[in-house]
Image (cartoon, grey):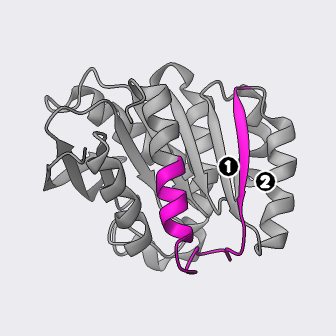
């Protein structure tokens, strides 16, 4: 049964900047998922908002967050600065741990494209604070030095037609020592724009997060 939920704008201070986000809260959240967007994307990404809605209806709180200020997002060096993005994710995770609506909830990261590299680096740097990671069309290779230190169960989802990224994910999977799984969605390209493919991603993510953040519900 789908849960109803509310969405509210939030503002986070981190690293001397102000970050804008949207916090989604179902009636009884089983956990909370923090989104790490890919290069050139942010909290308004239609694909990540679609996934977030599926998670919310499944009973998981979500935080869609711009990891860069507007002026920073115009600097290509910062867009691809995985260390900086991981710093911001860790600051957001700390904020969630203190926020009255989400404190006490187990945390998951959902990373897309380059955001997956930042999510995995953050998971490696603060293993006690994260319980699960999901990567969509991700670049986990960008966090290669950190991958052996990731302890959170990690799900890598890649499109079957996204050939170069499949190889990057296979190599990353070999470096991970945590509970792990690679799922290749047949017929999907990098952005999962083909009919039904993004729905598969959202369902896979929901099941993974419910398994490791709360009780898996059917």
Question: Is 204 positioned to the left or the right of 174 in the image?
Answer: left
Tell me which residue sits at (39%, 23%) in the image: 215
**SS label for mark 2:** helix
Look at the image and say whether residue 203 sits in the magenta stretch.
Answer: yes
Total number of numbered labels? 2
Q: Is residue 59 above or below residue 21?
A: above
Can residue 91 be seen here?
yes
Tell me which residue sits at (46%, 79%) in the image: 74
Q: Position of residue 125 (x, y in %)?
A: 59, 30
Q: Is residue 123 above or below residue 129?
A: below
Figure quadrant of residue 213: top left
**SS label for mark 1:** strand
Instruction: Look at the image and tell me in which quarter the C terminus lies.
Output: top left
Dot 1: few (<14), some (14–19), or many (≥20) neighbours within 10 Å?
many
User: Foreground residue, 63 or 191?
Assistant: 191
Look at the image and say whether residue 96 sits in the magenta stretch.
Answer: no
Q: Position of residue 4 (x, y in %)?
A: 15, 49
- Which residue in the protein does label 2 denote? 169
Figure quadrant of residue 123: top right
Q: Position of residue 56 (x, y in %)?
A: 28, 48
Tell me which residue sits at (65%, 24%) in the image: 151
Question: Is 98 positioned to the left or the right of 201 in the image?
Answer: left
The reply to whether callout 2 and callout 1 are in contact (CB within 8 Å) is yes
> Which residues make up the magenta segment?
178-204
Figure quadrant of residue 97: top left
User: Foreground residue, 9 or 57?
Assistant: 57
- Which residue in the protein does label 1 denote? 156
Instruction: Look at the image and tell me in which quarter the N terminus lies.
Output: top left
Q: Position of residue 15 (x, y in %)?
A: 37, 47
């Amino acid at each position: 049964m789908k849960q109803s939920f509310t969405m509210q704008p939030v503002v986070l201070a981190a690293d001397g900047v102000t970050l804008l986000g949207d916090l989604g809260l179902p009636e009884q959240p089983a956990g909370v998922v923090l989104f790490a967007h890919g290069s050139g994307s942010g909290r308004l990404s239609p694909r990540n908002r679609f996934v977030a809605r599926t998670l919310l209806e499944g009973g998981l709180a979500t935080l869609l967050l711009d990891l860069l200020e507007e002026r920073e997002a115009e600097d290509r060096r910062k867009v691809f600065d995985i260390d900086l993005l991981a710093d911001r994710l860790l600051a957001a995770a700390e904020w969630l741990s203190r926020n009255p609506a989400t404190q006490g909830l187990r945390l998951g990261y959902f990373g897309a494209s380059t955001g997956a590299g930042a999510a995995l680096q953050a998971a490696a740097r603060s293993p006690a604070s994260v319980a699960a990671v999901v990567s969509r069309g991700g670049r986990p290779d960008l966090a290669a030095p950190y991958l052996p230190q990731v302890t959170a169960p990690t799900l890598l989802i890649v499109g079957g037609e996204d050939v170069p990224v499949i190889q990057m994910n296979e190599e990353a999977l070999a470096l991970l020592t945590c509970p792990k799984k690679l799922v290749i969605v047949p017929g999907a390209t990098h952005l999962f724009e083909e009919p039904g493919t993004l729905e598969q991603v959202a369902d896979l993510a929901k099941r993974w997060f419910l398994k490791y953040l709360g009780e898996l519900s059917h």
